[in-house]
Image (tube, rainbow, N blue to C red):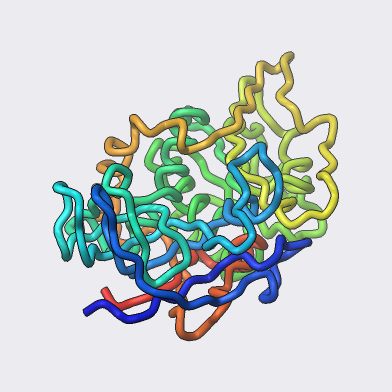
């Protein structure tokens, strides 16, 4: 049964620093009808990811900013309520970037049918969705890990870092994760199988990294930047590869980040640093998803999730995803599965 009204979270103001509740506004309106080639979908799981913070700003180097008053962009797992596209039928589960709302119009040309047999529906926006694909393809295509390599991952307990570390272990690497707090460190070593975990709040991060990586760092999966990156780069081994996936330390910055002179690839050591954007690797999605699903089936859920229901929080806790305070994949359950 379709509700009479559609709740939407729209961008009320561009955040300055960390997002505030007043930067968002809850609006209600009619449920939209689908046009030819479109689907009316009801959101089940909404994914909250750090990249959304960039879309709320005015930096055109990433993707077009969200216009003020528009629905906040975001990936979602949804159930088809009404279909005007021949490839989909009511009841199908799909994922698409339909945003923060109860009901949405999805384009039949871009929506992807989700196979519930591969894992829980929430994994379609987690380990089997953009975060998992980012971890797998970033590490494999850019990091190129080899057996015996030392791989260091920042924000290692997050949705991307947790999967990247496990992929590195499967590749036969020694994996060191950086995260904040004792609970996250225990999670990395005891649940995910990382070889070592370092608290990002330690008084001597460079010293802790040097002790954990006595032969240098062969692959660095960069999710944070800032002081963590500054501590990493002097320890890069000859021929190291740096996967520049994200930089959450400066997503809420009000001034341009300062980049240390040594935080560049060193041509004398043949280091290679490469910015990575998952959307450039679309041709590899299905192969990567099948491998991740196979590993998921053997190991159970390979990363935690932090989730809330939409009825419990009107701002949907976005700020946690851009500050690193969340644990694992951050989700909002909007309706029952």
Which residue lies at the image location 69% right of the left edge and 75% below the top edge?
A: 22
Q: Is residue 329 among the parts visible in the rendering?
A: no
In the image, taking residue 35 as reference, residue 25 lies left or right, namely right
Horizontal and vertical percent position of residue 119: 25, 59
Which residue lies at the image location 38% right of the left edge and 79% below the top edge?
A: 5
Which residue lies at the image location 28% right of the left edge and 42% below the top edge?
A: 109
Q: Quadrant of residue 217?
A: top right
Classify 190 as above or below 208: below
Horizontal and vertical percent position of residue 20: 70, 72
335 or 243: nearer the eye? 335
In the image, taking residue 5 as reference, residue 72 lies left or right, namely right
268 or 97: nearer the eye? 97
Horizontal and vertical percent position of residue 48: 51, 62
Which residue lies at the image location 66% right of the left edge and 16% below the top edge?
A: 270
Quarter of the figure with the C terminus: bottom left
In the image, taking residue 34 as reference, residue 214 lies left or right, namely right
288 or 269: nearer the eye? 288
Quarter of the figure with the N terminus: bottom left
Residue situated furthest bottom in the rendering = 312
Q: Quadrant of residue 105?
A: bottom left
Q: Is residue 216 among the parts visible in the rendering?
A: yes
Q: Quadrant of residue 77?
A: bottom left
């Amino acid at each position: 049964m379709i509700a009479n009204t559609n709740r939407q979270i729209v961008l009320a103001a561009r955040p300055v620093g960390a997002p505030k509740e007043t930067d968002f506004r809850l609006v209600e309106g009619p449920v939209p009808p689908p046009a030819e080639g479109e689907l009316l979908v009801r959101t089940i799981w909404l994914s909250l990811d750090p990249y959304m913070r960039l879309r709320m700003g005015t930096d055109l180097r990433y993707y077009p900013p969200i216009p003020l008053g528009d629905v906040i962009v975001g990936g979602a797992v949804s159930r088809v309520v009404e279909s005007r596209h021949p490839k989909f039928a009511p009841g199908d589960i799909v994922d698409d970037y339909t945003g923060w709302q109860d009901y949405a119009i999805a384009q039949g040309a871009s929506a992807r049918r989700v196979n519930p047999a591969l894992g829980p529906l929430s994994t379609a926006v987690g380990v089997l969705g953009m975060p998992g694909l980012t971890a797998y393809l970033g590490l494999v295509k850019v990091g190129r890990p080899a057996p015996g390599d030392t791989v260091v991952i920042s924000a290692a307990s997050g949705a991307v870092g947790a999967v990247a570390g496990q992929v590195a272990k499967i590749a036969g690497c020694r994996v060191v994760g950086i995260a904040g707090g004792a609970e996250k460190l225990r999670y990395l070593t005891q649940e995910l199988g990382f070889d070592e975990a370092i608290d990002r709040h330690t008084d001597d991060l460079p010293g802790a990294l040097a002790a954990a990586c006595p032969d240098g760092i062969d692959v660095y999966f960069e999710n944070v930047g800032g002081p963590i990156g500054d501590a990493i780069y002097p320890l890069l081994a000859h021929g190291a590869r740096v996967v520049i996936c994200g930089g959450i330390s400066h997503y809420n910055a009000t001034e341009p980040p300062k980049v240390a002179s040594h935080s560049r690839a060193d041509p004398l050591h043949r280091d290679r640093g490469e910015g990575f954007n998952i959307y450039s690797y679309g041709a590899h999605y299905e192969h990567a998803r099948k491998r991740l699903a196979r590993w998921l089936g053997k190991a159970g859920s390979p990363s935690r999730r932090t989730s809330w229901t939409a009825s419990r929080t009107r701002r949907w806790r976005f700020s946690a995803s851009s500050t690193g305070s969340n644990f694992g994949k951050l989700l909002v359950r909007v309706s029952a599965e």
